[in-house]
Image: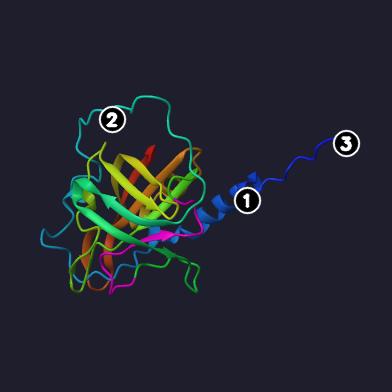
Amino acid sequence: MAPRRRRRRPWHRTRAYRLTRTALLVTVLVAMGNRCGWHGGHAGADGPDAVAAAGGEGASGEKPCEPPPGPPPAPLPRSRPTSFRIPSLGVEAPIAALGLDGERQLETPPVGEPKLVGWYQRGPTPGESGTAIAVGHRDTLTGPAVFAALAQIKPCKLIEVGRADGRTAVYTVDRMKVYDKASFPDKEVYGRVQRPELRVLTCGGLYSRRTGYTSNVVVFAHLTATR
């Protein structure tokens, strides 16, 4: 009896593809730490980001989140995201895919659509192993945008991302930090991870018409459920 041939893995599930994708992700998203492309017209009703002024960390003394019962959820296969929710902040928005501009820097959602969330389409999809990246405006010339309150998010709150395959990837927030652009930690934010994780970014800190915002708000979360 002839030996059975082993089926070749799909190209997008090979180790070489994942390593290449991770390297590309870190390289092209370095610009996010040095350039905030959001065309915000003001610093918001509350002025400078209070969290940035307080040192960029969530509330001190927060207890670790209680893990859900049972084993951690298995990573999901690749499927483009379709919706984005942060129930604790009242955020519910559609998602559009983003690529790179002519300078190989991450594009931003259109200024004319302030309630739109952008997803870096060359990185992992929500629920997939690795670091998925979501970005959005804090404000625009017309007023507050989708992530106006992102710096107020607390650890243990949920972020829910709907997918084209009908599944929902549910993430639990680990922490929120505000980084000055001049010292943005690329590896900490975009570095390679084994489990499915999510980074949500917007502008933060002080704003001036000449230089824009001084900082980036970054939310770190990991996959804790699928449905």
Label 1, on which residue?
17
Q: Is residue 182 visible?
A: yes
Q: Residue at x 20, y 30 (%)?
A: 61
Q: Are marks 3 and 1 in contact (CB under 8 Å)?
A: no
Amino acid at circle 1: Tyr
User: Which label number is shown at residue 65?
Assistant: 2
User: Which label number is shown at residue 2?
Assistant: 3
Q: Nearer the viewer, residue 128 or 131?
A: 128
Looking at the image, tell me whether mark 2 or mark 3 is earlier in sequence order.
Answer: 3
Residue 113 lies in the magenta stretch: yes
* Magenta-drawn stretch, dominant element (helix, strand or loop): loop
Dot 3: within a 10 Å radius of its alpha carbon, few (fewer than 14), some, or many (20 or more) residues? few
The percent position of residue 123, horizontal first and vertical second, equals 49, 54
Amino acid at circle 2: Cys
Q: Which residues are magenta?
A: 110-125
Q: Secondary structure at mark 1?
A: helix
